[in-house]
């Protein structure tokens, strides 16, 4: 593929990292453009007008000139990159099942595991609002439940779907492998720990940051 | 398609309705099995062991006997049903862009628009915990932002992606068309209102409930 690919990202965001990891595993070149979400750099009028009306990263910019397009949402950008590759199963059920884990990630995992990492390791507990403090216990319990569900699933299989790595593994790896920065204890989910090592051993793997 | 399809659902849930609507628009038969989420019927040991370890509906049950499989996550179930149909664009970018709106729905729309509907119209404001009350203002603002973003997008197009209805429209229609039960004012987003009518006019359309 020769089209220009630019990732609008914050290097601390594991949602952005998913896209970089997908590209790396597939041997695709991707240019990086950094924003600091803690300084509100994705909420400027320029960003909202030109990159993403939702004011969020990541956004994958594809093509140039008249063919230039912008794709928000981390898992959708991974889907675009991996289209037709070994990272998306062709079997009808497996493909839907892969998306099932990717929707689980955005609904039941990321809002808990990623948010606690951001609040505790990047904002700092002292900076949290009263409403945020009120949500800590629920996010802890829901994040632990998500990790436990993953652990049970991985007790009998090496990968989330089918016999090899798919985008479901990449989506769930992103915030799971840095979950301890949010106060989660990965040793409590040993099948998850072994699966994390399996992902990191894939040829082409790159680290976050 | 002749395989058995059973939807494990709560009729009040618009996440479940998405799947019924997809099946109806495609002329597919689907059996319904009802649970009452307010009575905890999806958190029983039987449900967790046999239907969904995540304790949530909807779950699409596919096939019987040795071929029986369970697919949680509303948008993944819609994907399974619509596989190879007109409701999923074949163009690579459009397909990813459709998923982008479906991930947006689960991340930025449903946790606000659906949750306020459930809290205010089904639980009742008097039943909310202190933590839930603390989240009302943020969910209101975030839900309004999601509806505004949809309205801006629909100002120049009839459907979310490409020239016809796709799963992105079905996913976003589900909780948007009942948003007023969560206190949202649809008249504030006139392009959304016209799009809702467009969806409801599709041949095969069925109502929620």
Image (spheres, coloured by chain):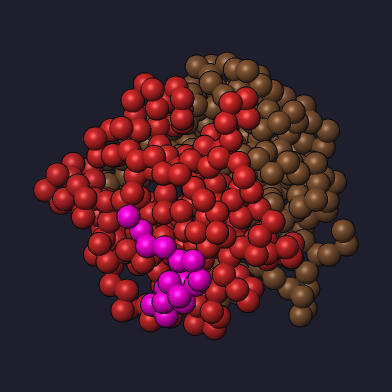
Chain colours: A red, B brown
- Is residue B127 within the magenta segment? no
Q: In which quarter of the image is the C terminus of chain A?
A: bottom left
Which residue corresponds to the image point at 58% horizontal and 65% vertical from the top-left? A166
Residue at 62%, 45% in the rendered image: A2
* Residue that sits furthest to the front in the current view: A2
Look at the picture and state if B167 lies above or below B60: above
Nearer the observer, B155 or B29:
B155
Please determine whether, in this image, residue B116 is positioned above or below residue A206.
Answer: above
The residue lying at 58 percent from left, 35 percent from top is: A63
Q: Position of residue B122 (x, y in %)?
A: 48, 42
Q: Residue at x 30, y 32 (%)?
A: A41
Direction from residue B115 to residue B66 in the image, left or right: right
User: Which residue appears farthest toward the left when viewing the image?
Assistant: A126
In depth, the one of A28 and A142 nearer the eye is: A28
Q: Is any atom of residue B105 visible in this view? A: no
Q: Is residue A24 visible?
A: yes
What x and y, as percent, mark residue B99? 61, 44
Q: Residue A198 colored magenta?
A: yes
**Percent x, y for residue B33?**
69, 60
User: Is B111 left or right of A142, judged from the image as shown?
Assistant: right
State left or right for residue B172 relative to residue A108. right
Whole-percent x, y for residue A108 in the image:
44, 57
Q: What stretch is highlighted in magenta?
A: A193-209
Quadrant in the rendering for residue B141: top left
């Amino acid at each position: 593929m020769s089209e220009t690919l630019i990732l609008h990202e914050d290097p601390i965001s594991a949602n952005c990292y998913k896209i970089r990891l997908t590209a790396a595993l597939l041997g695709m070149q991707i240019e990086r453009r950094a924003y600091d979400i803690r300084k509100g750099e994705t909420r400027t009028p320029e960003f909202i007008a030109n990159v993403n009306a939702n004011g969020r990263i990541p956004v994958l910019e594809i093509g140039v000139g008249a063919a230039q397009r912008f794709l928000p949402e981390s898992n959708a950008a991974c889907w675009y990159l991996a289209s037709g590759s070994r990272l998306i199963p062709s079997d009808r059920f497996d493909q839907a099942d892969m998306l099932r884990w990717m929707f689980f990630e955005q609904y039941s995992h990321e809002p808990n595991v990623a948010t606690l990492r951001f609040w505790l390791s990047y904002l700092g507990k002292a900076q949290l609002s009263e409403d945020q403090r009120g949500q800590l216990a629920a996010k802890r319990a829901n994040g632990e439940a998500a990790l436990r569900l993953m652990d049970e699933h991985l007790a009998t299989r090496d990968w989330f779907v089918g016999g090899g790595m798919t985008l479901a593994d990449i989506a769930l790896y992103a915030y799971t492998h840095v979950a301890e920065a949010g106060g989660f204890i990965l040793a409590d989910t040993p099948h998850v720990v072994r699966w994390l090592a399996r992902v990191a051993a894939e040829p082409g793997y790159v680290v976050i940051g």
